[in-house]
Amino acid sequence: MACSILAVDIGNTNIVMSLHDGQSWGEALRVKTRSKSAVSEVCSVLGSIGSWSKAVVSSVVPNLTGSVVEAVKNAGGVPPVVVGKDIETGLNRESIPDEIGADILCNLIAAHKLYPNEYVTVADFGTAFTTETVSPTGDVLGVTIGPGMMTSVKALFQNTAQLPEVWLDIPTTVMGRDTVSSIRAGVVYGFIGQLKEIVDKIEAEVGHKVIVIATGGFSKYLDGHIYVNRADVKHTLEGARIACLLNG
């Protein structure tokens, strides 16, 4: 019988919850991390999401971790695996930096599982824009961290007098003729160029081509670019699921 796993990813912007039935992921349900009622909203979602036999929590928001772990345990009757460098990951434990975020660790776990014989770089387009690279031997080679797409848009809005806060969309041209299209072109193509430059430098340092996986809420903008091999918005959840199986 397939093992159903609940994965909860507590990020800086959203708490994402989804159920894997052993074959595929269900709908990803979200609660705003900064909501004053975030924990009670999580409990409400957990009560409607179905049943599970195992659970896993990945968190980069320490003040919410304990409450959400307890909510998952109470809702499902099983204590969740909590992602961290001290659990079994399928990676070389000695190569994992002490300060690594749980989301980055999940990305690397899934990347190495998907491409065990390759150098793999994951580009995560979330609140922060991160890239993390793993070797064919499961060594964590390193990470880059910068502001994410919407973080950049918000900073632009907050620090300029006339530029609006816009919702990002795929630009139709790199040469915008109005403010909204100009911001979209600058941010989206800017991040595409940023990723290309980072990947080029990673490949120069490791002396090998890397497989590139894009994930996070804005990874859809990268799908189809020649240097992105795979775009999967649920890649982080998949890494958490693998971690759960390795520690079940």
Image (cartoon, rainbow, N blue to C red):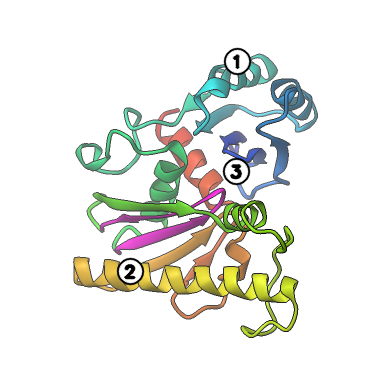
Q: Quadrant of residue 135 in the image?
A: bottom left
User: Do callouts 1 and 3 mark residues in contact (Cβ within 8 Å)?
Assistant: no
Residue 28 coordinates in the image, percent (x, y):
70, 45
Relative side of 143 to 40, left or right: left
| Magenta stretch encompasses residue 4 | no
Which quadrant of the figure has residue 47? top right
Mark number for residue 86? none
Q: Secondary structure at mark 3?
A: loop
Secondary structure of residue under mark 1? helix
Q: Give the CA separation, mark 1 to mark 2.
A: 39 Å
Q: Is residue 152 above or below residue 221?
A: above
Region rendered in magenta: 118-135
Read off the residue under disc 2. Answer: 210
Residue 131 highlighted magenta (yes or no):
yes
Residue 26 location (% of width, % of height): 70, 46
Can residue 25 be seen in the rendering of this structure?
yes
- Disc 1 or 3, which lies upstream in sequence? 3
User: What is the quadrant of the C terminus in the image?
Assistant: top left
Q: Are marks 1 and 2 in contact (CB under 8 Å)?
A: no
On the image, the x and y values in percent for residue 54 come to 57, 28
Question: From the viewer's perspective, is residue 169 above or below residue 10?
Answer: below
- Picture residue at 58% right of the left edge, 23% below the top: 64
| Residue in the image at 73% along x and 73% along y | 179
Q: Which residue is mark 1?
A: 70
The 10 Å Cα crowd at callout 1, few under 14, some 14 to 19, many 20 or more, is some
Give the quarter of the image for residue 205.
Answer: bottom left
Does residue 90 appear left or right of residue 233 in this picture? Answer: left
Q: Are marks 2 and 3 in contact (CB under 8 Å)?
A: no
Reading the image, the residue beneath label 3 is 22
